[in-house]
Amino acid sequence: MHSFSSRLIVWQHTHGRHDLPWQGADAYHVWLSEIMLQQTQVATVIPYYRRFTALFPTIAALAAATEEQVLAHWSGLGYYARGRNLHRAAQIIMEKYHGEFPREFGQILELPGIGRSTAAAICALAWHERRAILDGNVKRVLARYCGISGSTGEKAVEARLWQQAEALLPQHDIAAYIQAQMDLGATLCTRSRPKCGVCPVSSDCVAFQSGRVSELPTPRQRKAVPKRNATFLLLMHGRDILLEKRPGSGIWGGLWCPPQFDNEEQAKDWFVTNGMDADHGERLEIFTHTFTHFKLHITPLNIQLARKPLRAAQEGIVWLSVEDALQAAIPTPVRALLNKLRRG
């Protein structure tokens, strides 16, 4: 029987994905795609990737941009620390490596936002180095093929998966093999309704042969998703809105948002303390934004001000037209609110 890797490589040439815009690209573009694909579906990433590379075609162009510009074009992808780390890493590459993406695995691993699997993927896909990866899709493929039970997030389970990932590496056609693992997990060996009947390695897949495909990898124990509340003050003066820049770390770090509070009482106290004068206001429909680890119930208070307050002159606070605000670095729920205001 042909090896696991050889069957995957043959399958990839015939049935794998060959039209992804970053395939066959240089290390910069592979790196960018790998970062964008963390926690995000390929279909979502492709239009962002195309726009991003059109604006920042080189490491030098990315490093020369402001964080504000980078986050503005990351807006909507979520997990904004990825964008901040990407920008910082580009600056480090300019400073330490004269704008050339580093070739050494250890040097790549030192860059912000890059872990073992991402560094290995860059080396394998850009330079055909013999390195194993272990992203979400590959974890699922190997857990099923090798019959490894336990949650893939557990350290002991992950160590076993890394061991198998290294052991199954072929000597040649590394880039095709790495792409094949990702493609298999994305198209056949999916979390639900896997297509085992057409899988190239089902003949010796432990999960398939033992009837345990639905059990592996072992699902993580679901915890109750915490719920939090927030009140957004949509402070309007005509068609202009007041936005504050969030702190550099944490959720929506570095993005522009309306003033945010834990509840309406806090929002009202802040409004009064800052000497603001409302013409009229209304409470908009409460809606929910879901993060990985919690749900945020947002109450928007839309207030038309009689005048622009002095607070707008402070650093980190701007008045923008709704149209200009939609072009700025804003998170998804703020974008949804502004689009409603624009249509209203």
Image (spheres, rainbow, N blue to C red):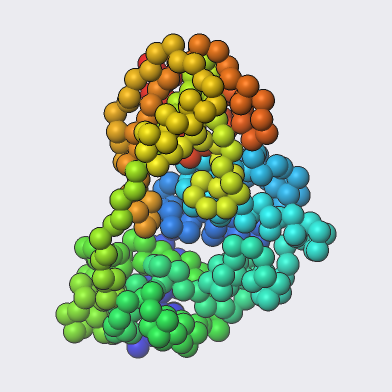
Figure label count: 0
Q: In this view, does 84 lie to the left or right of 92?
A: left
Quadrant placement of the C terminus: top left
Residue sitting nearer the eye, 6 or 102: 102
Residue found at x 65% / y 39%: 69
Q: In this view, does 155 lie to the left or right of 49?
A: left
Residue found at x 27% / y 64%: 223
The location of residue 106, given as percent across then percent down, is 68, 76
Residue sitting nearer the eye, 125 or 79: 79
Q: Vertically, is 288 above or below 196?
A: above
The location of residue 210, given as percent across then percent down, is 19, 84
- Specify whether residue 46 is in view: no
The location of residue 148, given as percent across then percent down, is 32, 84
Task: Determine which quarter of the picture holds residue 219.
Answer: bottom left
The location of residue 238, given as percent across then percent down, is 50, 12
Quadrant placement of the N terminus: bottom left
Extreme-left residue of the structure: 211
- Specify whether residue 190 is in view: yes
Residue found at x 70% / y 42%: 66
Residue found at x 38% / y 74%: 153
Q: Vertically, is 210 above or below 283?
A: below
Task: Determine which quarter of the picture holds residue 23.
Answer: bottom right
Residue sitting nearer the eye, 268 or 175: 268
Q: Vertically, is 196 above or below 332?
A: below
Residue sitting nearer the eye, 189 or 318: 318
